[in-house]
Image (cartoon, helix red, strand yellow):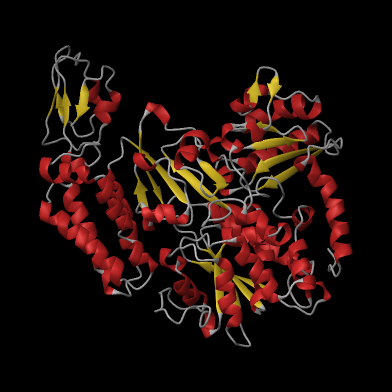
Amino acid sequence: MNVIKTIDELNAIKAAAAEVVNVRVEGKDSGVKDVLVCGGTGCTSSGSMNIIKKLEEEIERNGLKDKVNIIKTGCFGLCALGPIMIVYPEGTFYSKMEVDHIPEIVESHLKDGVPVKKYLYAETVEGDTIKSLNDTAFYAKQHRVALRNCGLISPEHIEEYIARDGYQALHKVLTSMSQDDVINCLLASGLRGRGGAGFPTGRKWQFAKASQNEQKYVCCNADEGDPGAFMDRSVLEGDPHSVIEAMAIAGYAIGANQGYIYVRAEYPIAVERLEIAIKQAEEAGMLGDNIFGTGFKFHLGLRLGAGAFVCGEETALMTSIEGNRGEPRCRPPFPAVKGLFGKPTILNNVETYANVAQIILKGPEWFAAMGTEKSKGTKVFALGGKIHNTGLVEVPMGTTLRTVIEEIGGGIPNGKKFKAAQTGGPSGGCIPPQHLDIPIDYDNLIAIGSMMGSGGLIVMDEDNCMVDIAKFFLEFTVDESCGKCTPCRIGTKRMYEILTKITEGKATMEDLDKLEKLCYYIKDNALCGLGQTAPNPVLSTLRYFKDEYIAHVKDKKCPAGVCKSLLAYKIDPDKCKGCSLCAKKCPVGAISGELRNPFTIDTNKCIKCGVCASNCKFGAISKS
């Protein structure tokens, strides 16, 4: 692609590319079908690249090369049904694709125009009618802003991003807006940082602009480390140019000419697509010197992280970019005054940047009209755990947890009851059933002992032990602590040791008191956000599920039957038929008896693996 110098040249590319992309966006039938196959990490791990290869073979064999385009996209969102394939202009949604399905789909649908209903997502089929994907329960209540292009365009072709108004905002900023205009636009929109703390984005940019220095930097935090979180990864895999454009806008707003995207090396697809996107943006003149002939220059580089959770903290991230061990620094001074290489720096996460261009183009009022009074816009969640529809969800701020779990997520599988939802990962807290109808926003979550975090949302049912959940997150934090400050390095280990005592039935009520005091001490004295928020899972479970802690301590029982040290398997002699299957399956020979007579379990030998109970056909084995 030649360097784009004017708005007319940009619009010419947009018009040409829009003819292709509108097949998907508006369902316009151009006589050519677009087959979109998810190329995100989830579907790729399930074999979507093999599906693309088979599609190419079958399309060639059926002589359809001029009538079918295969588009490798980012994540569609409904990860539970991957690999996913959508055929446009019809918009038919094929789920759980297998290579063996492809020949029939190519011949029947792509060649003869008859969709193969047995492979379609069930919710899109009503008798002889095939509904729009947007009419399904999973998508109907979503509002996609940050994810607007994910699953709709090819992330490896800049023309498709341009067709969706790509780089229009950058041109508008450089040619008709002052630095203060850009910052005021973000301030008026109410956009808050989507990385966890929720600090107003415009105010952060305002502080950095006010800092006087010849060299400033713009950084992107793509070091997504929360267990179960994959929002930022999916944006980078599906729409990398939205982040690149926003970072260039940020560079103009604060007076920076260099940016860095810090992305974890465990995201190889995201890294590859970022490299492609940066190269294409440079070739098109959207990065580099004299962008749009305005004299503004902005360069962008990638820096790969080694998977340290602490490098999600802004000062630790900058220290890592500088080539040093990723450890946090004392604040103040804050990065807006002294950040990367000691220069004024702004750092936002991927989702925050993904909103910026749309705010510039559609106006701050458009964005501020969504959400709640203090939390504007939408929020992306990675919905996982005990839920039917695992995947990516983007909803307006203020949507209730019940709506996300029961309507969009499809509820809890196997008829189980909802017990809790963990938001904010290791830094967040557990939300109990009595708060299912609370509107999700920054302030409401903090008020009930949790936090927004980057957007992980893990759903738990009645079979989860809340003490064990707290212990799981503490174990993660202990492992990921950089060790620089004593409260985090030592304090979290002491907390983990107490939790271990509780799950083993060795703790006292004094240990519970000690655990709570330790939580507050660490929150008040740890150096960075990792240590300061590490006690949150413990404090929230103590707040809402203290009866489970007491049962572990006083009764030496785990109500959910999870903590092995407190479990005992027994065989009901009235139900046991003496079939001997449990004895045959027991890996340690702990079960004995005579055929057609009740069997027994030697509790001294039993390792509490549960194999016997899972294999008993008569429901004779239970745990207590």
* Coordinates of residue 305 in the picture (x, y in percent): 50, 67
Q: How many marks?
A: 0
**Who's the residue at 25% across and 47% down the image?**
467
Q: Quadrant of the C terminus?
A: top left
Pick the quarter of the image with the N terminus.
Answer: bottom right
Of residues 566 and 403, which is closer to you in this image? 403
Q: Which residue is drawn at the image coordinates 38% and 58% (left, top)?
A: 427
Residue 216 location, quadrant? bottom right
544 up-or-down from 184: above or below? above
Q: Quadrant of residue 179?
A: bottom right
Determine the residue located farthest toward the front in the rendered image. Answer: 373
Q: Name the side, left or right, on which 209 lies relative to 8.
A: left
Asked if residue 231 lies left or right of residue 39, the reply is: left
User: Residue at 45% of width from left, 33% of height from top?
Assistant: 411
Residue 336 in the image: state x and y as whole percent.
53, 78
* Residue 424 visible from this viewpoint: no
Residue 581: x and y in percent read: 25, 21
**462 left or right of 112 in image:** left
Q: Is residue 62 at all visible to an observer of this figure?
A: yes
Q: Is residue 207 above or below residue 357?
A: below
Percent position (x, y) of residue 46? 55, 40
Q: Is residue 609 left or right of residue 72?
A: left
